[in-house]
């Protein structure tokens, strides 16, 4: 698969982008690739998630997988809404998720996969990073293309550098795009600078920090990464050109 074969749409974010959509604290992203759609997290509110999806012309019944990065409320608030509209989903949850919750989920969707510490491939070019022993336990979505990997994080509680380093080792390739929450909103400017330097040292080519990254950290990262920085925000669509560079992106 080539990067030009995929598209990412931010469906739920506390960072504004598309004025047609509403913002609340939380995150959700849709991956679309050859023959497969993956909903990554569900934001903090099902009604708002559904409104944003309808506005963008996205049918929940057309989603194949629901990938839950971790079990904080701002990433799973829309879970019931999505499962009600699409009970045929295959749900991937990190190890450490409440056993009672998992028992209930088995009755609400087609299949539940519990992801342990090891990477788990679940569709062509798609895998979980494996669950990191953070608090709470968290997994990242890894999309492998011939030009590099695309990594989507929920809140990066294990550390965004830790995740990028692990994926680089797992895939044997560089990270072409690191998107999602970086969890830097309470960190110092020095820590943000060090994070940027560490990501650059790992060979991360483009970044799209949003959600819990924090406004000041996002501004600082934009200054440090320049044209390799891609803004986040609900409704933003990220596509790649034939050379594997982020192409024209915007609200659809």
Image (spheres, grey):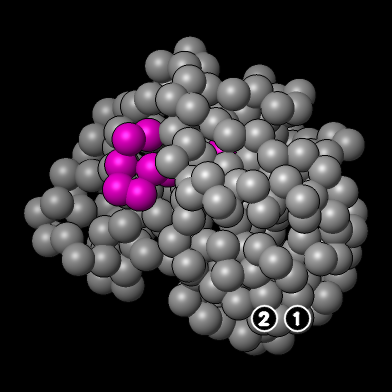
Q: Quick check: 23 above or below 207?
A: below
Does residue 3 appear in the picture of this structure? yes
| Residue 75 rendering spot, x and y as whole percentages | 52, 62
Secondary structure beneath label 2? helix
Q: Is residue 96 left or right of residue 57?
A: left
Q: Quadrant of residue 78?
A: bottom right
Q: Residue at x 70, y 27 (%)?
A: 122
Instruction: Name the quadrant of the C terminus.
Output: bottom right
Q: Judge left or right: residue 188 versus residue 38.
A: left
Q: How many marks?
A: 2
Magenta stretch, main secondary structure, is loop
Q: 189 or 243: nearer the eye?
A: 189
Name which residue lies at 10% across and 54% down.
Answer: 190
Question: Residue 219, how many percent across, how many down?
Answer: 31, 67
Gap in angstroms between the C-alphas marked 2 and 1: 5 Å
Other-residue count near label 1 (Cα within 10 Å), few / some / many at <14 / 14–19 / ≥20: some
Q: Is residue 128 above or below residue 135?
A: above
Q: Of residues 138 and 202, which is closer to you in this image?
A: 138
Is residue 134 shown in magenta?
yes
User: Which part of the image, by quadrant, shows the N terminus?
Assistant: top right
Which residue is at a point 64% across and 47% down the rendered structure image? Answer: 103
The picture places residue 164, in percent across and down from the top left corner, at: 38, 33
Q: Which residue is mark 1?
A: 51
Q: Which residues are magenta?
A: 132-141
The reply to whether discs 2 and 1 touch (Cβ–Cβ < 8 Å) is yes
Q: Residue at x 67, y 54 (%)?
A: 104
Is residue 200 visible to us here? no
Q: Nearer the viewer, residue 44 or 2?
A: 44
The residue that label 2 is drawn on is 48
Residue 59 at x, y = what percent?
88, 64
């Amino acid at each position: 698969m080539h990067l030009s074969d995929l598209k990412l749409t931010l469906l739920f974010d506390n960072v504004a982008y598309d004025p047609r959509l509403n913002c609340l604290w939380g995150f959700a992203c849709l991956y679309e690739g050859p023959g497969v759609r993956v909903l990554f997290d569900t934001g903090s509110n099902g009604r708002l998630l559904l409104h944003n999806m309808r506005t963008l012309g996205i049918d929940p019944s057309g989603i194949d997988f629901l990938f839950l990065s971790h079990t904080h409320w701002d990433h799973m608030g829309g879970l019931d809404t999505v499962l009600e509209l699409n009970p045929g989903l295959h749900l991937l949850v990190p190890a450490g998720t409440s056993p009672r919750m998992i028992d209930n989920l088995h009755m609400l969707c087609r299949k539940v996969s519990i992801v342990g510490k090891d990477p788990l491939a679940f569709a062509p070019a798609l895998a979980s990073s494996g669950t990191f022993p953070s608090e709470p336990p968290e997994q990242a979505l890894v999309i492998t293309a011939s030009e590099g990997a695309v990594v989507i994080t929920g809140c990066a509680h294990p550390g965004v550098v830790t995740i990028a380093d692990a994926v680089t080792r797992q895939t044997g390739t560089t990270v072409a795009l690191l998107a999602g929450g970086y969890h830097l909103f309470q960190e110092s400017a020095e820590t943000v600078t060090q994070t940027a330097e560490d990501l650059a040292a790992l060979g991360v080519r483009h970044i799209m920090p949003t959600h819990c990254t924090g406004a000041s950290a996002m501004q600082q990262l934009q200054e440090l990464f320049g044209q390799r920085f891609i803004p986040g925000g609900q409704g933003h669509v990220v596509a790649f050109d034939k050379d594997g560079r982020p192409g024209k992106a915007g609200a659809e």
